[in-house]
Amino acid sequence: MEFFVLYFQKFMLVFARMMGLMLTSTFYESDSIINQVKLGLTFFVTAVMFPVVFDNIPEVPQDIVQYGLIAIGEGLIGATIGICITISFSVYQLAGQYFTVQMGLGASEVFDPMSQISLPLMGQYLYLVAIMVFLAIKGPLIIIYELYYSYGLVTIESLTNGVIINSPYGIVGIFSSMFLVALRISLPIVASLLLVSISMGLLAKAAPQMNLLMIGFPISIGVSFAIIILLLPLFVEFVDNYMNETFNSLYLLMKEMKVGT
């Protein structure tokens, strides 16, 4: 206890970086988790991590203004890590938007209690499956590991060297790859719905008296759900690999930020 009392200012710097992560990272930033729980979890993890990362904590200046700026910088480092992870998780909601309208469920949206916004039905379904895989691979603990690694790799100066933007693993690279990965996820369903639309068009020409509007939507929805059920094991495996790749890319980004300083 005396150790924490003597180095309380350094302890608060670790707390600031951890709080930045908790407020922006997937799972931890959910509004479903009350603020008291977030604050208690942040304090507990900080207390466990503080002795381990003590040597990599910035020196505490005597000026209170400089100390405040350092604390803000530490919070920005944690927030940057959390934002990168959150952007990567948006790929599942984006993939659902690609084929929700073609399925005939474009007007149906559900309220996401984690992000407090309305999302397309299928995007929310894929996101929930991804969250379950995330929990199965101990994703929340891996996020804490990423923050731990950041103490040996990322400093406040690292945020200003441009690597976070220019690196292929940076924010711009994450944004660009997000659309490609979402297209890869939704491509089997989009292709199947395209074949269904072509078949309905040919059937409309062959039998104009048929009311294809009434049977088109059930067929599109049924085919889509059948494809989703068949590909669900492959989707779970894909999510697992993609999350491992995401965390590995984040670690490589932090290594590049260290080299660039």
Image (spheres, rainbow, N blue to C red):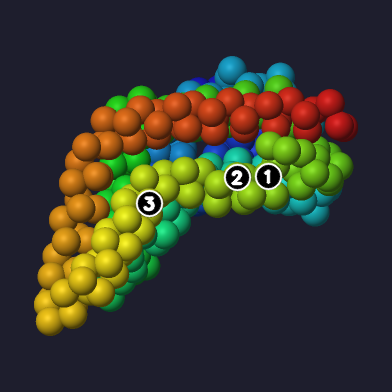
Q: Which residue is mark 1?
A: 173
Foreground: disc 3 or disc 1: 3
Q: CA distance from mark 3 to mark 2?
A: 21 Å
Q: Quadrant of residue 240?
A: top left
- Disc 2: CA contacts within 10 A as few (<14), some (14-19) or many (>=20): some
Q: Amino acid at mark 2?
A: Ser
Nearest to the observer: residue 216 or residue 70:
216
How far apart marks 3 and 1 lie (CA) works out to: 27 Å
Residue 198, by quadrant, is bottom left
Task: Looking at the picture, tell me which residue is in the foreground, 134 or 47.
Answer: 134
Q: Secondary structure at mark 1?
A: helix
Q: Is residue 52 depicted above or below 134 in this figure? A: above
- Residue drawn at (58%, 26%) of the image: 248
Q: Which disc, if any, is residue 191?
A: 3
Q: Residues within 10 Å of mark 1 (few under 14, many from 20)?
A: some
Query: Is residue 19 among the parts visible in the rendering?
Result: no
Disc 1 and disc 2 in contact, CB within 8 angstroms: yes
Please tell me which residue is depicted at 40% across the width and 38% down the height of the picture. Answer: 41
* Secondary structure under the numbered disc 3 in the rendered image: helix
Which label belongs to residue 160? none
> Where's residue 164, x and y in %?
75, 43
Q: Are marks 3 and 1 in contact (CB under 8 Å)?
A: no
Q: Which residue is mark 2?
A: 177
Quarter of the rendering occupied by the C terminus: top right
Q: CA distance from mark 1 to mark 2?
A: 6 Å
Which mark is first along the chain, 1 or 3? Answer: 1
Whether pointer 3 and pointer 2 mark residues with C-beta atoms closer than 8 Å, the reply is no
Looking at the rendered structure, the kind of residue marked 1 is: Gly
